[in-house]
Amino acid sequence: FQRLDKLSAEARGVDITLQSVKTLEDDPPAGYLPIIKLEPAENSSLRDITVPNGQTPHHFHINYPPPFTISSPFGRATRTCLARRATDPESPKVFLKDSWRAAAMEQESNVYLRLREKGVAHIAPCVCGGDIKESFHETKTHEEAKKSWACSPDKLRIEHFIHHRLVLGVIGHDLVRFSSTKELVKAISDGLKGNSFAFTARSDILTEAYRSWICPQIS
């Protein structure tokens, strides 16, 4: 307990990239201009979340906590929610995805950018995204599994995960919610065209897209 007591809040599991809007207003970082436009949902509070974007991270407001889409304790702890830019009062709502990606896989945000560079149609625009570089945002158990004291270290395989966030400029809806047969057929057509264009542009991009659960934009 003494070691736990001396740990920083971040080392105990507190995510410093997610802060209450009120705290940021009291001590804002340079260039931060909070614009609250996303109303807090019932039984939630408004939080500022940092999303990587090269050397300049972006700030968004979300309702916290975001809902769990899958209750299983296994997997990548993927959570999605609506968000709005914290510094732009006129910005539309966007789609934010927070997950833990397998380190062996390419960053999902990079896959979107590569598809865009190749001119692949019907792909949701990637606003920003990337791996969170702060400490304690990647798993370490896979390293311990290789130690001599571990149970069967030559047979024990533990995946290495990295915390990743992605923001898309399109908010989709369930395919079963269509207003006409034409809308349904067009949505399926756009998806098939997106896959076809990606395959033509470069097959390895399409393969990575499937592995990362990339879906063509339904317009």
Image (spheres, helix red, strand yellow):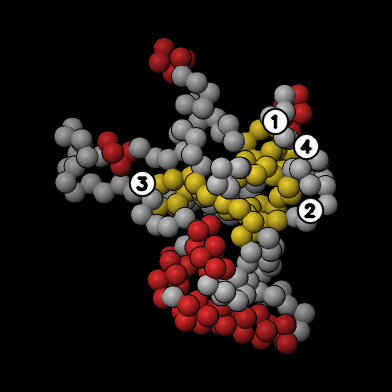
Residue at (56, 78) in percent of width and height: 194
Lower sequence index among marks 3 and 2 = 2
Judge from the rendering whether residue 29 lies leftward or rightward of residue 39; answer left or right. left
Q: Could you tell which of marks 4 and 2 lies nearer the N-terminus?
A: 4
Helix, strand or loop status at disc 1: loop
Left or right, residue 218 beside residue 135: right
In this picture, is 5 found above or below 218? above
Q: Amino acid at mark 1?
A: Ala
Q: What label sits on residue 160 in the rendered view?
A: 3
For the residues labelled 4 and 1, the Cα–Cα distance comes to: 12 Å
Front: mark 1 or 3 = 1
Residue 98 visible? The answer is no
Q: Judge whether 55 appears above or below 108 on screen.
A: above
The answer to whether 98 appears left or right of 41 in the picture is left
Residue at mark 2: 91
For label 1, count other residues whose C-alpha is less than 10 Å away and answer few (under 14), some (14-19) or many (20+). few
Q: Secondary structure at mark 2?
A: loop
Pointer 3: residues within 10 angstroms few (<14), some, or many (20+)? some
Q: Nearer the viewer, residue 118 or 12?
A: 118
Expressed as whole percent of the image width and height from the top left, the position of residue 109 reads: 53, 57
Image location of residue 13, percent across then percent down? 50, 30
Mark 2 nearby-residue class (10 Å; few <14, some 14–19, many ≥20): few
